[in-house]
Image (cartoon, rainbow, N blue to C red):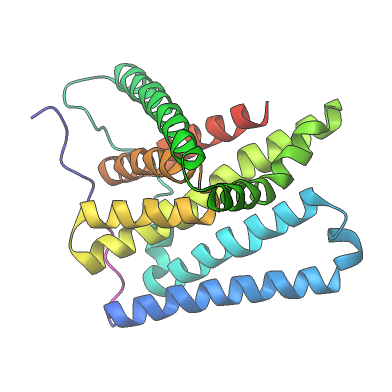
Amino acid sequence: MILHSPARLISPRPGISPAKEILVFVLSLLLGFGLFGAIYALLSPLLSHSIFGIAITQNVVVFLGSAVLYAYFVFYRKAPKALGLRAAQPIIRGKNRWYEGAIILGITLLVWGLSALLQYAVGEAIQALPKDVSAWISQFDAESEAMLEKLQNDREMASRLKQLLIIGILTGICEEILLRGALQPLLIRLTHSPIAGILLTAIIFSLLHQSVLNFLPIMVLALWFGCLRHYSGSIVWGVLIHILNNSLALF
């Protein structure tokens, strides 16, 4: 067998049933969104004119805060490991880390290529739809991508650095902690199926990006993140590739 066995999932602490775990996850998310809304309302004069301020608050409060709160109540002292905040275990048998890293990078390039082909194919399919439907999809995607386009149009060095730190690095870390760190293992435990857990997480991740054109391309990339998380027991590989992907998208 070429691959090592998947990393063992961290079990919830005694007394935490699946129903309680789901409840804690949902309540943590609701609290995160509620706190984000409260902060936005209190600081609206500042945040309403700051894309970076909104991005920081959303990432730290909603994504990171919800994941940490959920993990603390469900796993307590095991929370960091449960979220995949640990060194990645070897994935490929009999190979050193440099070789494994090169293989992962190569597969990532193939995944990016497949995502680009899917984006092109979906774009052609959208154009073949009735004009009203095609126009609605185009408008929906344009509204969803307005923030990113606004950021990309600001080419000052200071702004570029903030884009890299916040959209590239912070978003990559916080999204992985919530989606692959917390949600994916939860779904795997609930469905008793790694395939179902990884697939459902990828679908949710892609839906969060609110793009018809990019739904399948993002989902393919998310499936790759999910596989890396499942086999390595860590979100490290996913975070690194996610940061690289976001950073390249900005430039």
Q: Residue furthest right?
A: 45
Residue 121 x, y percent position in the rendering: 42, 32
Give the main secondary structure, helix, strand or loop, of the magenta stretch: loop
Q: Residue at x 51, y 42 (%)?
A: 213
Relative to 45, 206 lies left or right: left
Q: Is residue 181 visible?
A: no
Q: Give whichever of 190, 1 is nearer the camera.
A: 190
Relative to 68, 9 lies left or right: left
Residue 43 x, y percent position in the rendering: 86, 67
Residue 230 x, y percent position in the rendering: 28, 46
Q: Give whichever of 51, 64 is nearer the camera.
A: 51
User: On the rendered image, what quadrant is the N terminus found in?
Assistant: top left
Q: How many marks?
A: 0
Q: Residue at x 53, y 32 (%)?
A: 245
Magenta part of the chain: 9-14
- Judge whether 131 appears above or below 72 on screen: above
- Judge whether 109 appears above or below 173 on screen: above
Q: Residue at x 16, y 32 (%)?
A: 3
Q: Residue furthest left?
A: 1
Residue 69 x, y percent position in the rendering: 52, 70
Q: Give whichever of 12, 222 is nearer the camera.
A: 222
Q: Is residue 224 visible?
A: yes
Residue 90: quarter of image: top left
Residue 53: quarter of image: bottom right
Relative to 168, 40 lies left or right: right
As for residue 2 lying within the magenta part, the answer is no
